[in-house]
Image (cartoon, helix red, strand yellow):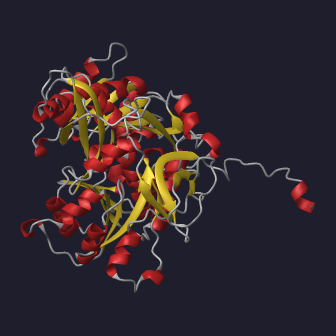
Amino acid sequence: MGWMQDETGLESRAANHVALTPLSHLARAAQVFPRREALVDRDIRLSYADYHAAASRLAGGLVAEGVASGDVVATILPNVAAQAIAHFGVPACGAVLNTINTRLDADTVSYILSHGGARIVLVDSQFLQMCEDAVGRIDDKAPMIVEVPDPAAGFPASGRHPTWDDLLAKGSPDFQWVMPQDEWESLALNYTSGTTGRPKGVVYHHRGAYLMTMGTVISWRMVLYPRHLTIVPLFHCNGWNHTWMMPVLGGCTICCRDISAAAIYNAIADERVTHFGGAPIVLNSLVNAPDEERREFDHTVEVFTAGAPPAPATLAGMEKIGFNVTHVYGLTETYGHVTECLWDSAWDDAPSDEIAARKARQGVAMPMMEPIAVLDDQDSQVPLDGKTQGEIAIRGNCVMKGYYRDPDATAEAFAGGWFHSGDIAVQHPDGYIQIADRAKDIIISGGENISSVEVEGCLMGHPAVSLCAVVAKPDDKWGEVPCAFVELKKGATGDEADLIGYVRERLAGFKTPKKVVFQELPKTSTGKIQKYELRDVAKTL
């Protein structure tokens, strides 16, 4: 009892309570590491003083264009310097950053820009035509386009819109950053397809992103001055928050516009890359790269991999060529990775195939998270026997605020006090989680989520299609690819190339079925298509 009963004068105040935000990392780095190399994009090399000044100019330029606190600023950019700068410059003026997948079609991008209410969209010249098409479909309050040219990559300015340099010229390196007063304020808006055709807007807060950056440092066993290569697209969970993290350690963010084995090997050899994250397809490309694309390097490169369970053979192959791979797991709704396959030294002497199999597990909760469980239909923990299946359920500060303008979907996702991932897994006696099956309607291809419902909806628009179902087909390169099973209308004839071309004209290329099978679809007595049978067939194709 005693003194705890009287807390007079112990309230939070300016001296002892500051809202957590990743913006503070760059502000500190500009003071602590002003001359250290912070951002590299081919010939562009910025110190931390330069990086902070560029973000400040962007923030000031956005304000000059009428952007206010709480407004949304979108980007359609590959992993280039402007995208990294936008991660700090957009929220530095109080705005919310909406990074959009560059591989999406104009209709989907139009929906995202409209639903999110973007005031300005920063777009790389490579994607300008698609962006103009998307903006042209918005009848009311269409966003202003600011073009980010990249002449070195073959994409000069069109002359039709103000440019990135024009925008920065309206700002000042002395712009006073708008720091959040409440760490629950929205920081980013990321759209994910989930299990429906239309994307859902996942809202991040400053607190979650800050804690993600701190927890990742621990899990990745990082020390001062790492050199991180941006393989994970910065439009995907904000690059797993790694760009926000690097200033904590005075590290360098190295941009990689076009992802290839040769580009990665060159960056490791020339830029001394120490860390990168990537989907299993990236690891596969490194393991299988021809000799002419490889470069020698004399240091161990730490790799986070996620997106789909990596094949044990891929993990084993990476170890042999100088990479230490840690398997992590997460979703857009959790800011990226929230579990890690934390290595136990007791496994060191296990046979190589067993080591690779253990590394393929999704693992245990990362330090910034609360325990992550596998629950049954009654939200009770399943037995930790490595056999009983349940749904991965997540709780912690790195879980989204919710789905933007979708309270019903938010309530459903958070039912029972957990975020329900939709991923089916088992939990081993040591607590390590291992995915047994993906949420049934989602296909994960090269780290990208594809909604089967969206692809089915497109196929159903073809005049020859009576009924269709799209499932995942295993693929050595992409992990999974869409496979369509189609029932034709009476009198119609099947043409695989025609159907694939039909979808390609209407959806992003990665959503296009890679195989079309013409057959009667198996159904229940109520007419529901039995997709599990089709998945079994797809495995044999």
Q: Residue 174 falls in which quadrant of the image?
A: top left
Name the foreground residue: 283 vs 121.
Answer: 283
In this view, the residue farthest toward the left is 292
Q: Residue 101 falls in which quadrant of the image?
A: top left
What's the residue at 16%, 31% (across, down)? 499
Residue 325 x %, y %: 34, 69
Task: Say if 199 sits above or below 270 in the image.
Answer: above
Residue 315 x %, y %: 30, 69
In this view, the residue farthest toward the top is 139
Can you see residue 163?
Answer: no
Can you see residue 298?
Answer: yes
Name the foreground residue: 191 vs 18.
Answer: 191
Numbered circles on residues, count: 0
Question: Is residue 333 toward the left or the right of residue 135 in the image?
Answer: right
What's the residue at 38%, 39% (across, down)? 530
Q: Residue 351 falls in which quadrant of the image?
A: bottom left
Question: Is residue 340 toward the left or the right of residue 82 in the image?
Answer: right
What's the residue at 31%, 50% (across, down)? 536
Name the foreground residue: 209 vs 26.
Answer: 209
